[in-house]
Amino acid sequence: MKRPENLVFRLGTGLFGLVLVLVVVAIGVELSRQSWLSIQKFGLNFWRTETWDPVAGEFGALPFIWGTLYSSILSLLIAAPIALGIAIFISELCPNRLKPALVFLTELLAAIPSIVYGLWGIFVLVPAVRAFEVSFPQSLKWIPLFSGPPFGLGMLAAALILAVMVIPFTSSVAREVLKSVPVAQREGAYALGATRFEAISAALFYARTGIVGAVLLGFGRALGETMAVTMVIGNNPRISLSLFAPQHTMSAVLANEFTEAAEPLYLSALIEIGLVLFVITLVVNSLSRLLIWSMARPARKAAATTVVPAVESAA
Amino acid sequence: MTAGTRRRKFVSSLFVAFCAASVLLALVPLAFVLFFVVSQGVQSLNLAFFTHMPAPTGEAGGGMANAIVGSLIIVGLGALFAIPVGILSGVYMSEYAGTRFASLVRFAADTLNGVPSIVIGVFVYGIAVLPFKQFSAFAGGLALGVMMIPIIARTTEELLLLVPGTMREGALALGATHARAVFTVVVPSAAQGIMTGIVLAIARIAGETAPLLFTSLNNRFFTTKLTQPISSLTVQVYTYASSPYQDQHRQAWAGALVLVAIVLTCSLLARFATRRLESLNPR
């Protein structure tokens, strides 16, 4: 059994596995090292102040954090219900013959490059949003969400485009999670006379941790999305509640200003934004994976031992 | 039927309607994007787009020959970095699936997969641009490679786990070493699936812009030098999209059409390949 060749094989392939681990560690180390100048100079104030003035050497990153979180949360408010609806429709409601086509089409949404969404955003979505903002009733303008002049470019366009881009990720994970709910549970509900809504909401309740995980996964995607957002959000580092206001995000400021950053401090400040974006997405993604995993794994084990294959294909 | 039952049935059909509507709601933007990319792109796509260099700013005509070649070079480099690392680490994760280190590698792969592409760009800028004070095709390829590795690794792992254990055991029983069993029996039987995974990874990565912005940068001229800044389709589309010239907008749409065509072709190919795979080994 213990042949030396086998040890060589294990170490050899393991070495390539180690490359993956090292890359992740290296990203953290390299970003911290490069942003050290800014971390030392500004400390926590970097994240508490909102003046971003590279010429004067003032760097406050609050507007970017705000823009990233606000746009991602808004996009999730739009995307999460739709993505869940799609997952439920595909896994529970639609005829089996339609399933592969719908899965393919929703996954196509994820395959379209970000830059193409951005191009479409600039030339099609933004003018449409501007028209909507222009026709927005003046009597409702006092609400902070809708204040400000109609630019078209801004938070609303960014949230809409992000929602479209996030939907396929959340819906495909939610579909997997729903698959892991024991079929017997739904059959039991139907046998007791439950309507479709009642049976499915019971399944959703059973799968709640995984569903939260799926939504968080979408959140992680939205946080890091760069090109499409950069092209439609207006790139204005101003904190505002208004959906109509041009704002900025962490990824957008990197895409816009990185190559112009000639000062070491400026570059270091930008890299610190990258570091924090890395850490936030790492935490969100790990949490989401933990939730999905805790849901999908025990169920898979149960499916392997108890559920008769015939039942599975009937569902 | 009592009032209560009627209400329950009504709520239920509302719910079903909502789910069906959300599918339509997601397909509308897809149809819109594809419609505009095709209708705008077709108008501007011609032979010159593939064979000519960009026209001077403000002048009509020209093409993206340099960007197309640049994209091929960068994506090719990325694949060159990522395929060996991806496949071999995938082999490790599936062959030693229960071990702690395999879980760590899997965690690293999933983490890397979730790192925003712009952050990968910043990272590669730090390790491959800053030390040489030079934006380069090599750095761009490295950035795309880093993004491809986790996709290929996880696909390889999942496909190898589907190979029946009896095949591996058969090879081992005949006296093969573990490596021989894996590379001559297990991996070949999953080869088609792994190829599909690689094609999908390439399709996904070919559309990336953010990691190239400050690694391979852009170049107005034709170059194949790996140590020079190089143009790419995606960065070129970005540059043109934000320019004030109508003609450059048209070029951007043409570029977007080419990108979407690449992605669509790869996805369709992969889909037919997996379908054939499934019909060959029914589960």
Image: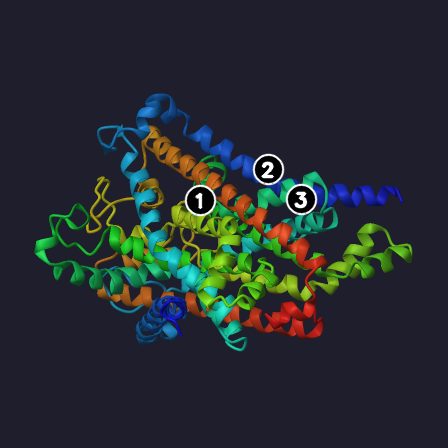
> Is there any visible trace of residue B253 in the rendered image?
yes
A237 lies left or right of A37:
left
Quarter-wise, where is residue B8 in the image?
Answer: bottom left
Label 2 amino acid?
Leu
In percent of width and height, residue A96 lies at: 54, 75
Please say if B1 is above or below B78: below
B80 lies left or right of A153:
right
Looking at the image, do the residues carrying marks 1 and 3 touch, with CB atoms under 8 Å apart? no
Q: For mark 3, what is the residue?
A: A16
Q: How far apart are marks 1 and 3 (CA)?
A: 22 Å
Q: For mark 1, what is the residue?
A: B121
Identify the image's colour scheme: rainbow, by chain, secondary structure or one colour. Answer: rainbow
Residue at image coords 36%, 64%: B53
**Which residue reaches farthest right?**
B174
Disc number lying in front (2 or 1):
2
Please say if B50 is above or below A74: below
At numbered mark 1, what does the secondary structure look like: helix, strand or loop?
Answer: helix
Label 3 amino acid?
Phe
Q: Which of marks 3 and 2 is nearer the N terminus?
A: 3
Label 1 amino acid?
Gly
